[in-house]
Image: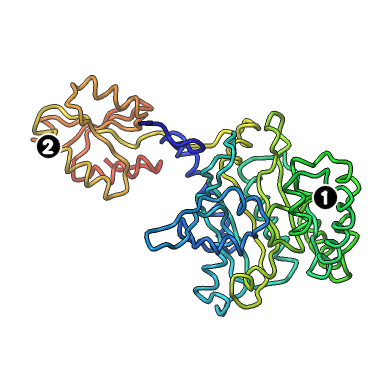
Amino acid sequence: MSMKAPRGTFDILPEEAAKWQFIENTIKDICRRYHFDEIRTPLFEHTEVFQRGVGDSTDIVQKEMYTFEDRGGRSLTLRPEGTASVVRSFIEHKMHGYPTQPVKLYYFAEMFRYERPQKGRMRQMNQFGVEAMGSADPAIDAEIIDLAMSVYKELGLSSLKLVINSLGDQESRVNHREALVNHFTPYKDELCSDCQTRLTQNPLRILDCKTDQDHPAMKTAPSVLDYLNDASTMYFEKVKNYLTAMGIDYEVDPTLVRGLDYYNHTAFEIMSEAEGFGAITTLAGGGRYNGLVEELGGPSTPGIGFGMGLERLLMALEAENITIPTDEELDCFLVTVGDEADEASVQIAHELRRKGIQVDRDYQDRKMKAQFKAADRYQAKFVLVLGESEIEQQVINVKDMRTGEQQEVPLAQLANYLQGKLSGGNVDE
């Protein structure tokens, strides 16, 4: 019996969880400013949601999904990505009928993909993502990109590169698809087995192949930008103009196609250029998916979104030597002397917590000196000392561990006294 976490998973211990909480709270505040609301979807969906939503030709569906059959014979899959689940919920709850459009949603969710574990890419991943459905305005494409860049910049990252592309509308994609088939067909036998299949299923995915990325035919493949019709070209120009207006630097990469079938028009990735970050530099990626809502059975609804790996975000912060501020100090620690004081401390701690004050106490029946050592380990700001004489007088000794000053405070005024001290204000004795 193995008592280790399964391969491709890891524990987030308390000292690390504080960093995750800081990052998540920062992101939530940014989403509030951009007027995005949180959505939480199930950990698993009917397999068809991902087969239809992500695309049968993708590596995710073909190779990476955790799929199982429940006792009722239904095929279910642990979610490998967030967009399909959110779109399913959008359709099921008829959000397209909301009076306020577009519907702007964000989520924090665990994703599951069976792939070779490596640093920053595990089999259970934590992801932040946003989806905006109900608008075909290129301005919201730029807003989505701006939101993603704001997360990284507000957390202190500077070694970033934004890469964008346009996959065009349906007409543009059909024309480009035909050009790709004509281009790669003479080299079919030289391509990997996956790309040979993609040549008929989704030739655009060949451009995203890691196995054949150095094949000479890749360098001369037709650019999607050469096959954009006037409407698609105008749309892409507006997105670029909005990014420029916001002072967001970007590079256009015609080979950027993303790994999911549902993308069209705007596609983008944000990468880390920090020294020593690693070979896989992508931090976040997303794009527009007009047609996905219809594919999953909903009404015609345009949409755009992105997914951001939180593990890779932490890696980027580490690569740029950015320290995440975490408050590891404890407000108060109760030190008791004697059985009567020990019993009384339970009620005192209860009342202080109800007043919003963070407090802990000894649960190991330790001597007074050992309790003070525990307070030091917890980095307590104040130590509250209670003995039999203090109980008789209904007072408690409060020691400020930063200054060493001690004050005898009536128990009835303790919460008010500590609130004043912890807020930095003056408290009348």
The x and y percentages for residue 131 are 61, 62
Q: Secondary structure at mark 2?
A: helix
The x and y percentages for residue 245 are 79, 58
Q: Amino acid at mark 2?
A: Glu
Colour basis: rainbow
The x and y percentages for residue 25 are 50, 49
Residue 97 in which image quadrant: bottom right
Q: Which residue is mark 1?
A: 253
Q: Amino acid at mark 1?
A: Asp
Q: Earlier in the sequence, mark 2 or mark 1?
A: 1
Q: Secondary structure at mark 1?
A: loop
Residue plotted at (88% across, 45% down): 217
Quarter holding the C terminus is: top left
| Position above or below: 371 against 216 | above
Please tell me which residue lies in front, 184 or 97: 184
Residue 52 in which image quadrant: bottom right
| Position above or below: 16 against 150 | above
Quarter holding the N terminus is: top left
| Position above or below: 229 against 254 | below
Is 203 on the left-hand or right-hand side of 321? right
The image shows a total of numbered marks equal to 2
Q: Which residue is mark 2?
A: 343
Is 77 on the left-hand or right-hand side of 120? left
Residue plotted at (30% across, 35% down): 332
Is 335 on the left-hand or right-hand side of 99? left
The x and y percentages for residue 417 are 29, 42
Residue plotted at (85% across, 61% down): 176
Residue plotted at (22% across, 41% down): 349
Label 2: few (<14), some (14–19) or many (≥20) C-alpha neighbours in 10 Å: few
